[in-house]
């Protein structure tokens, strides 16, 4: 049994993705709104994507700027890569927990208000 566990751990370590990345969880913005912003930077160079997001009109871009800066810092400090050689390889957003609140209506009724959260992942890669 222990041998099989060691083999599985070795296989997982061998197949681990070593690209620089950053994650942010429990962001109080709807995943669909963040997805629109992330589609603009996917495939672009890291420096260009950062400039694009810093000058974007959307309020959601502020979260993406912070995440992109974190991913670039991870690449420079942990992997020893140059920021000019990086590009945004993958980005995705998943739904987080939904905060369910009550919206009071007329005649003693109540509607459900869904305050959505999301988890964002951003992976950088080196231009070949």
Image: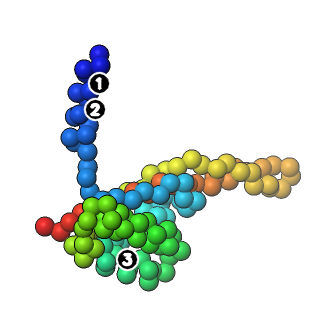
Q: Is residue 4 left or right of residue 50?
A: left
Residue linked to disc 3: 50
Mark 2 nearby-residue class (10 Å; few <14, some 14–19, many ≥20): few
Q: Is residue 16 left or right of residue 118?
A: left
Residue 125: x and y in percent read: 24, 63
Residue 89 visible? The answer is no
Q: CA distance from mark 3 to mark 2?
A: 36 Å
Mark 2, secondary structure of its residue: helix
Q: Which quarter of the figure has residue 7?
A: top left
Give the number of the mark in front: 3 or 2. Answer: 2
View extreme (right): residue: 107
Q: CA distance from mark 1 to mark 2?
A: 6 Å
Residue 81: x and y in percent read: 24, 67
Front residue of 62/29: it is 62
Q: Residue at x 30, y 68 (%)?
A: 76
Residue 44: x and y in percent read: 27, 72
Q: Residue at x 47, y 73 (%)?
A: 61
Tell me which numbered mark, 3 or 2, is placed earlier along the sequence: 2
Mark 1 nearby-residue class (10 Å; few <14, some 14–19, many ≥20): few
Q: CA distance from mark 3 to mark 1?
A: 42 Å
Residue 49: x and y in percent read: 34, 75
View extreme (top): residue: 1
Mark 3 nearby-residue class (10 Å; few <14, some 14–19, many ≥20): many
Residue linked to disc 1: 5
View extreme (left): residue: 128
Residue linked to disc 2: 9
Tell me which numbered mark, 3 or 1, is placed earlier along the sequence: 1
Mark 3, secondary structure of its residue: helix
Question: Is mark 1 in CB contact (under 8 Å) with mark 2?
Answer: yes
Front residue of 45/70: it is 70
Quadrant where the image shows the N terminus? top left
């Amino acid at each position: 049994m222990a041998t099989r566990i060691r083999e599985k751990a070795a296989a997982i370590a061998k197949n681990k993705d070593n690209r620089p990345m950053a994650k942010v969880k429990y962001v109080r913005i709807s995943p669909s709104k963040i997805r629109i912003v992330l589609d603009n930077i996917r495939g672009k160079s890291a420096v260009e994507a950062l400039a694009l997001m810093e000058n974007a009109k959307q309020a959601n871009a502020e979260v993406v700027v912070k995440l992109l800066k974190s991913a670039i810092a991870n690449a420079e400090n942990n992997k020893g890569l140059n920021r000019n050689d990086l590009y945004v390889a993958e980005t995705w957003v998943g739904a987080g927990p939904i905060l369910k609140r009550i919206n009071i209506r007329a005649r003693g009724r109540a509607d459900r208000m869904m305050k959505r959260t999301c988890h964002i992942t951003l992976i950088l890669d080196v231009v070949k």
